[in-house]
Amino acid sequence: MRAGATHTWLDRLVRGAVAALFASVVWAQTGPAGHWEGSFKVNDREIGLGLDLTKNAKSEWIASMSVPAENVTGLVVMDVVVNGNSVKFVGVELMMSRFDLALEPDGRMRGNLSNPQTTAAIEFKRMGDAKVELIPASPAVSKDLEGDWEGSIEMPGRTFRILFHFRNQADGTVAATIDTPDSGAQGLPLNNVKQTGRKVEVGIRIAHATFQGTVNPEGTELAGQFAHEQNGVPLTLRKR
């Protein structure tokens, strides 16, 4: 082998080693936190997604997603679990898609997303710092409202069960969620929770819906109207 060829080969080897070392250092320092952009294919159609992932003041992992092509941001992400280079979460408004990703030495995250209709490979590239958009916290509610409420919506030929959960937090806010057991959804966040005396208003952003009702004097029943777009149906919930 000629001396010049040997020198070129050694240069490439050194550059490759330096690049690998740099990638491993970046991975070790930053982990999965950041703003990520990626895409997956369904029926030969490519769909782009954004992911913002970071830790909050309590060192808990939080995240939100976006669909850049539709200028949609702040999509709800639940059940974020980061363990080493493993990243798992659920994209609520993306058909409750489950993401199972791994942060790899080249600095990218790769894995799969799955929902009742599809399973697809997806790859994310870090594009900058995370800007997580969470649903704003709502103020704490009264003791009468705090707790678990169960009811059902009657539709032609079908009944949908609904559960509201209100848990006051130490910081003066309420953790408010909704379950729809018949669809398998649990712990979906409620927004814009407002209580004025016995009157209660709740936003269900994920479903583009609202609920307005009144707690009875005994604190055992919450009756009102569940509205979705232009349609409204009565809904009565009883405290469990």
Image: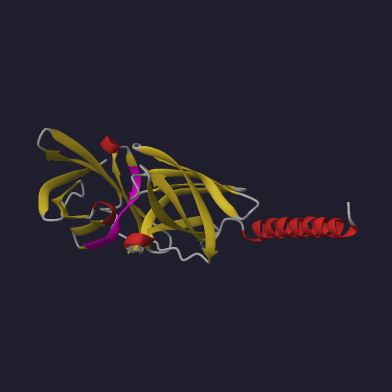
Stretch in magenta: 186-195
x 90%, y 58%: residue: 3
Taking the image as shown, residue 209 lies to the left or right of residue 130, namely: left
Q: Is residue 73 visible?
A: no
Residue 30 location, quadrant: bottom right
Q: Quadrant of the C terminus?
A: top left
Does 15 appear above or below 103? below
Q: Is residue 167 visible?
A: yes
x 33%, y 64%: residue: 71
How many numbered tags mark residues here?
Answer: 0
> Is residue 49 shown in magenta?
no
Q: Where does the image place residue 173, in percent across and percent down from the top left?
A: 37, 62
Q: Where does the image place residue 91, in percent across and percent down from the top left?
A: 39, 49
Does 128 appear above or below 146? below
Which residue is at the front of the view, 97 or 117?
117
Most distant residue in the top direction:
157
Does 119 appear above or below 141? above
Residue 16 location, quadrant: bottom right
Which residue is at the front of the view, 143 or 106?
106
